[in-house]
Image: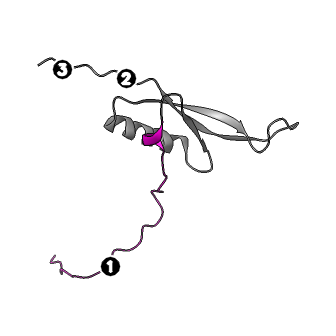
Amino acid sequence: MKFTLESNIPVPAPRGGRKNHDWPFAEMKVGDSFFVPSTAAHEATVRQHVSRWSHHHPEQRFAVRKVSEPVGPVGLPDHPLQKGVRVFRVEDWLLPVSKE
């Protein structure tokens, strides 16, 4: 089979798939955390992004936990809860110092 080469054909827009989240990993200090509602991203997606960030920044450590957080003003009876995950920046990992 022979293929015909063509030029100047525009690339179609993506059909779903990746969503561009502005993950705040770079701004996080030890003790900071952020909540991701289950409607915004699946837990596995959040964990994958944390893992990828940690791979490129091995000195930074994170913990991801499933949580249910209050929606709206706290203290109301029968307060509704939002399920999701919370990403915590935990202590920095001390990398071994190379001796030269």
Q: Residue 93's mark?
A: 2
Marks 3/2 in contact by CB < 8 Å: the verdict is: no
Q: How many marks?
A: 3
Q: Residue 31's mark?
A: none
The kind of secondary structure element at disc 3 is loop
In the picture, the quarter occupied by the C terminus is top left
The kind of secondary structure element at disc 2 is loop
97 to 81, vertically: above or below: above
Badge 1 crowding class, 10 Å Cα cut-off, few under 14, some 14 to 19, many 20 or more, is: few
Question: Which is in the foreground here, disc 1 or disc 3?
Answer: 3
35 on left or right of 5: right
- Amino acid type assigned to the residue bearing label 2 in the image: Trp
The kind of secondary structure element at disc 1 is loop
Q: Which residues are magenta?
A: 1-28
> Residue at 48% across / 51% down in the picture?
22
2 to 36, vertically: above or below: below
The magenta stretch spans residue 67: no
Distance from label 1 to label 3 (Cα)?
A: 49 Å
In this figure, which residue is indicated by the disc labeled 1?
10
Q: Residue 98's mark?
A: 3
The magenta stretch spans residue 4: yes
- Amino acid type assigned to the residue bearing label 1 in the image: Pro
Badge 2 crowding class, 10 Å Cα cut-off, few under 14, some 14 to 19, many 20 or more, is: few
The residue furthest top is 99
87 on left or right of 54: right
Q: Nearer the viewer, residue 50 or 57?
A: 57
Estimate the x, y position of residue 34 in percent, counting from the top left. 57, 39
Estimate the x, y position of residue 37 in percent, counting from the top left. 62, 45
100 on left or right of 59: left
> Residue at 84% across / 35% down in the picture?
75
Estimate the x, y position of residue 29 in percent, counting from the top left. 48, 33
- Amino acid type assigned to the residue bearing label 3 in the image: Ser
